[in-house]
Amino acid sequence: MSKPKILLIEDDLDLAELTLLYLTQQGFDLTHSESAQAVANLPADLNFDLIICDIMLPDTDGFSLFAELQARYQCMIIFMTALDGQQEQIKGLELGASDYIVKPVNPELLVARIKANLRKFPGEAAPQAVTLHDFTIDHTHQLLTIGDRPQKVTTQEFDLLWIFAQHPGKVLSREYLFEQYVGRPYDGLDRAIDLKISRLRKKIDSYQIAGLTIKTVHGQGYLFNYQPQTADKG
């Protein structure tokens, strides 16, 4: 399995060196740039699974650089910065950042946050549609079709089903589903995700499509699967 490729954009060279050393030891493939110009000078054929970007850079700010990074690399972007104000964090997340980490950060926590974000879209690029037999969920157009028939779903139902559809036949924990759906760590108490799954299950049941299920796996989480039932051939 190839190592996840990460671009670190950080102008504090001492911090960058320590971060590069630790993340490399943890199994990541790191590239470092100290400025927006250094990023612009990177080879055109380089691709990354995730970008960690400082906000206070010598030739621009990370917020201004965000759109360019997103267009060029089409991967997840995490802001890692000493700016700890609420408005800066809101701005970064509303721009589309996958996460906002305030420095200084414990190295082990940084690795955990990186891994959590990489789990959102395993592989080199985020999928835009998932097809299982005649079930297709199209994230780009927010469209669900089963057997070439569009199915009505609310935006919230679609977002939750999208998470499930990327992991068919796999048990997803409440913690994982909460983090992916809500966008923040699970506190161990909130049961809102269970209610949303219950509503989604009722919607799926209303389709009356044999083999399309969301099952509760007690003590572990939830399992989504679609195995169309076909008539036995004599």
Image: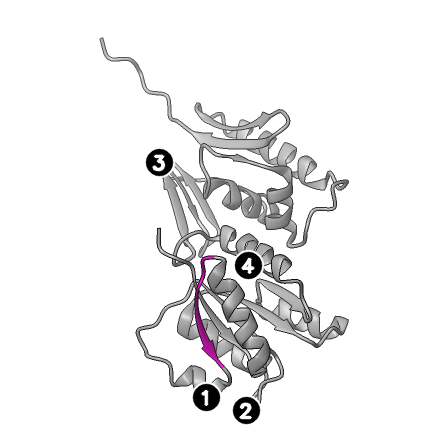
Q: Secondary structure at mark 4?
A: helix
Magenta span includes 191: no
Q: Secondary structure at mark 3?
A: loop
Amino acid type, label 3? Asp
Single out the mark in the foreground, 4 or 3. 4
Give me the C-alpha separation between circle 4 and circle 3. Answer: 34 Å
Residue that appears at 50% across and 30% down? 207
Residue that appears at 59% across and 45% down? 154
Q: Residue tagged by mark 3?
A: 134
Q: Secondary structure at mark 2?
A: loop
Q: Earlier in the sequence, mark 3 or mark 1?
A: 1
Give me the C-alpha separation between circle 1 and circle 4. Answer: 25 Å
Q: Secondary structure at mark 1?
A: helix
Q: Residue tagged by mark 2?
A: 59
| Residue that protrudes farthest toward the bottom in the picture | 59
Single out the mark in the foreground, 2 or 4. 4
Instruction: Please give left or right for residue 118 compared with residue 195 in the image.
Output: left
Q: Earlier in the sequence, mark 1 or mark 4?
A: 1
Give me the C-alpha separation between circle 2 and circle 1. Answer: 8 Å
Expressed as whole percent of the image width and height from the top left, the position of residue 225 reads 46, 31
Q: Residues within 10 Å of mark 4 (few under 14, many from 20)?
A: some
Q: Residues within 10 Å of mark 1 (few under 14, many from 20)?
A: few
Most foreground residue, 45 or 25: 25
